[in-house]
Structure formats: C-alpha cells, structure tokens
C-alpha cells in the first residue's frame, strides 16, 4: 500500500501584523526578506517551513518589544499564526498474484 499525504495550511500573518501595528516593511527587514515576500505570504497562504514559522513569531515579539521599549510583550505561538486547513491522504493499493504448484 502506498500513501500520499497532502497538507494545506493558512496563516494569520496580516491579522497579527495589523493588530500589533507592524508594517510589511518592518517585518521584511526583521526576517531579511522582501516586502513582496511578506505580501505573498499574506495573500497566497503559501506553506512555510517550521524554522521560518518560528522566525516570524519571534519577529513579531522583537518588533513589538522594540516599538514599545519593552512595555508591551507579545505571547504568540506558532499555532496562533499558522494553522492546518486540510489534510488529504490518498492511498493506493496494488494486487499481486501468486501461483502455487499442485
């Protein structure tokens, strides 16, 4: 039996960026990415790796801390921003034939 796992994820980057008054440019600079890349993440909901997801969460925390001189802390987790929309598992089976001697 062979299996294929497909996952579709989404994110709330734009929601939290606006909530904490962070611009795409600020986030892009902190992540060392382009502003266009941040925009693409927000619009197209492309899948990101675990390390980038952690970097994004940490960037929100660092930017907010810097902007508020440490007076406001952000308690975000990766699960707050990234979520799983759909998991699809496709399973294919194959038949084998055997012959036996009588």
Image (spheres, helix red, strand yellow):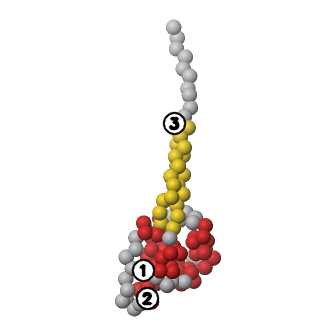
Which residue is pictured at 40% across the width and 74% down the height?
76
Residue 8 image position (x, y, % from top left)? 54, 57
Q: Residues within 10 Å of mark 1 (few under 14, many from 20)?
A: some
Count of labels in the image: 3
Badge 2 element: helix
Q: Which x, y percent locates residue 27?
A: 53, 80
Q: Is residue 1 above or below residue 44?
A: above
- Which residue appears at 41% of the width and 90% of the height? 68
Q: Position of residue 97 (x, y in %)?
A: 56, 22
Q: Residue at x 54, y 83 (%)?
A: 23
Q: Nearer the viewer, residue 97 or 26?
A: 26
Q: Give the CA distance from mark 1 to mark 2.
A: 9 Å
Residue that protrudes farthest toward the bottom in the picture: 69
Q: Residue 86 or 55: which is nearer the viewer?
A: 86
Q: Is residue 29 among the parts visible in the rendering? A: no
Which residue: 61% across, 67% down? 44
Q: Which residue is mark 1?
A: 61
Q: Position of residue 46 (x, y in %)?
A: 58, 64
Q: Nearer the viewer, residue 101 or 51?
A: 51
Residue linked to disc 2: 66
Please give the residue where the numbered disc 3 appears in the rendered image: 1
Q: CA distance from mark 3 to mark 1?
A: 45 Å
**Classed neighbour count for the residue bearing mark 2: other residues with Cα under 10 Å, few (<14), some (14–19), many (≥20):** few
Q: Secondary structure at mark 1?
A: helix
Q: Residue 98's mark?
A: none
Q: Answer left or right for 74 relative to 17.
A: left
């Amino acid at each position: 039996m062979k299996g294929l796992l497909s996952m579709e994820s989404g994110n709330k980057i734009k929601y939290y960026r606006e909530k904490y008054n962070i611009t795409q440019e600020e986030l892009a600079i902190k992540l060392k990415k382009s502003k266009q890349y941040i925009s693409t993440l927000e619009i197209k909901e492309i899948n990101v790796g675990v390390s980038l997801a952690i970097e994004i969460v940490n960037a929100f925390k660092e930017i907010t801390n810097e902007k508020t001189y440490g007076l406001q802390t952000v308690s975000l987790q990766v699960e707050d921003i990234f979520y799983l929309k759909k998991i699809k598992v496709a399973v294919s089976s194959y038949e084998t034939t055997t012959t036996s001697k009588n």
